[in-house]
Amino acid sequence: MPNFLEFLELQVLLLDGAMGTQIQGADLKVDKDYWGQENCSEILNLSRPDFIRGVHMKYLAAGSDAVETNTFGGSSITLGEFDLSEKTVEINKRACELAYEAIAEFTHDGRPRFVIGAIGPGTKLPSLGHIDYDSLEASFALQTDGLLEGEAHAILIETAQDPLQIKAALNGARISMQKKNRALPIMVQVTVETTGTLLVGSDIAAAATVIHALGADVMGLNCATGPQEMADHVRWLSQNWPRKISVLPNAGLPEMHHDHVHFPLNPDEMAKWMERFLKEDGINIIGGCCGTNEAHIAALNAMLEKQSAKRRPAPAKRTHHWVPAVASLFQATELRQDNAILAIGERCNANGSKKFREAQAAEDWDTCIDIAKEQVREGPHTLDICTAFVGRDEVKDMSEMVTRLRGTVTAPLVIDSTELIVLDAALKLYGGKPIINSINFEDGEEPAHKRMALAKKFGAAVIALTIDEQGMAKNVNRKLEIAHRLYDFCCNTYGLPPSDLMIDPLTFTICTGNEDDRKLGLWTLEAIEHIRKELPDIQIILGLSNISFGLTPPARHVLNSVYLDHATKRGLTGAIIHVSKIAPLHKIPKYEVEAAEDLIFDRRLPKVA
């Protein structure tokens, strides 16, 4: 039998239909069949194995290539609502066994078939504060233990409504896999409501940005709506998502008919929609969600058989263009901006903003959030958040800020801290794809290893400073040397996409009057140019305001603006700045621009004899 991903390379895969439709339509008794646990479908794996096995067999007889385990609510937290947490592994393992027992009845035709371990979202969303990340991750890890013991071929995180829940489920699954020394493909299917977003407000691009950073093998859609309502989102995935795609719609948009929910889409209509997705959008996996039954799967099977003399057609070719980005809970932001830099707002920083620091010290969080909102209105693409200040509990303060900002601002966050425990706490609260600021080699590679492990686990981009054991790099050669070391460390050792690596070659003030400092700005510009040529796929970023320390505010605004213009022309892609204090050069008097350039390029008046 080919493995699951090999199959997807060669053929479209037909998954099954809804398990809930079958359970709800059956005459099952609470005491006898549910063992008194009303609405706990997963207990049927133990109490009525014959029934669950029979559902799988209906779908296999209809033509399914794979069946999903009856484990939608199989996490220890969800089962705990029925006092069944201690049976988590047993229930999930038995669910896989029942799927295998059903498949065993169809081995005569020689077709490969797969058992897909299903993980639902549970009943608590972490981005809404219903549950903490660690508890959720642990519950999904335990569920995956059972699915692995049952020999599932792949893990499906389905009906996902919250990107932070996706992180917990995917990381929990990987913890289990690492423990058991097994690596299974991971599929993630999000549920897009009729509003056009996930339940917590994420659009499809934001969700895809997070899921891509987490390394899922397949992304798709299921539940909430029928194929018609999914069409625009399927098209977006087809044009953008670089990996495999799955689509499992409901049998139409659910309608309330007196005392029950009605799903209006008949099998033939479902098959016509899915045929369109296959031919126009090049999807790899089809199947059904709520309201679908074996008749819908039989119609999909017949549609597939018409397309190819073989048992299954090959996936249609598609052209996609993936754009590297970061994301808030709500929307994605491209890392490379057209005709501009990625602007990172600098004002939510206890070390750089007196107003923010005083509000933080008074625990006036409303004012802190207002500063963030004001910045967003000024136009930065992301917000740098730093709560490090002497005498304060940085973990507590950072957690307050991230918890309040994640549902308030649309700009992605840059988590700025030198403390690993602070980064860890913030990442467990944030459903978007953030940026970690920062890593360096000042204390050797051990601290950098820990930060990169966090970045990979939570799918974060990384700002990396050109600092090593010898100190901060000042001349061009040292900056370039450390930049290459950072690239090798982050991208080759940890597999971070080069586009997610944001190297900061460091700016230093050129306004001290010291002879040794006069060329520091020029050397940084030259380093930017060399790094851009030698590492073209990474981002290059600066903490811009460092260049002008020591000057009056008006002079700083001019020098910062002029320096940013030159840095951008050399290859800079991003900067930590106060956006409203940056002016285009045509709005600055020519003599002021020339004076700033005299400083930057160390142009001096000839000495008078």
Image (spheres, rainbow, N blue to C red):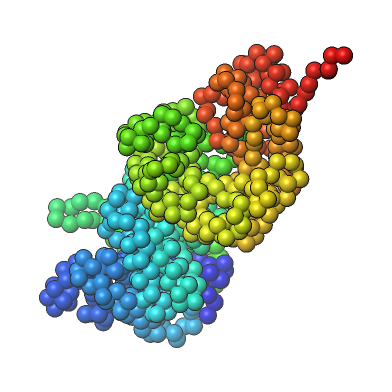
Placement of the C terminus among the 4 image quadrants? top right
Residue at point 65%, 13% (across, down): 589
Residue 325, x across and y down, in percent: 53, 45
Q: Please determine whether, in this image, residue 148 is positioned above or below residue 428.
A: below
Residue in the picture at 58% in, 36% down: 543
Q: Is residue 420 visible?
A: yes
For the point 46% across and 72% down, the residue is: 177
Q: Position of residue 228 (x, y in %)?
A: 38, 49
Residue 123, image x, y percentages: 27, 58
Residue 309 at least partly seen: no
Count of picture labels = 0
- The answer to whether 403 appears left or right of 283 in the picture is left
Q: Residue furthest right?
A: 609
Q: In the rendered view, would you say 308 is above or below 356? A: below
- Residue 53 lies, in percent from the top left, at 30, 79
70 to the left or right of 103: left
The extreme left residue here reads 31
Q: Pick whichever, 284 or 525, lies toward us.
A: 525
Query: Which is nearer the eye, 9 or 591?
Result: 591
Q: Which of the two residues, 556 or 163, is positioned nearer the viewer here?
A: 556
- Examine the image and state in which quarter residue 273 appears: bottom left
Residue at image point 40% right, 53% down: 425
Q: Is 133 above or below relative to 503?
A: below
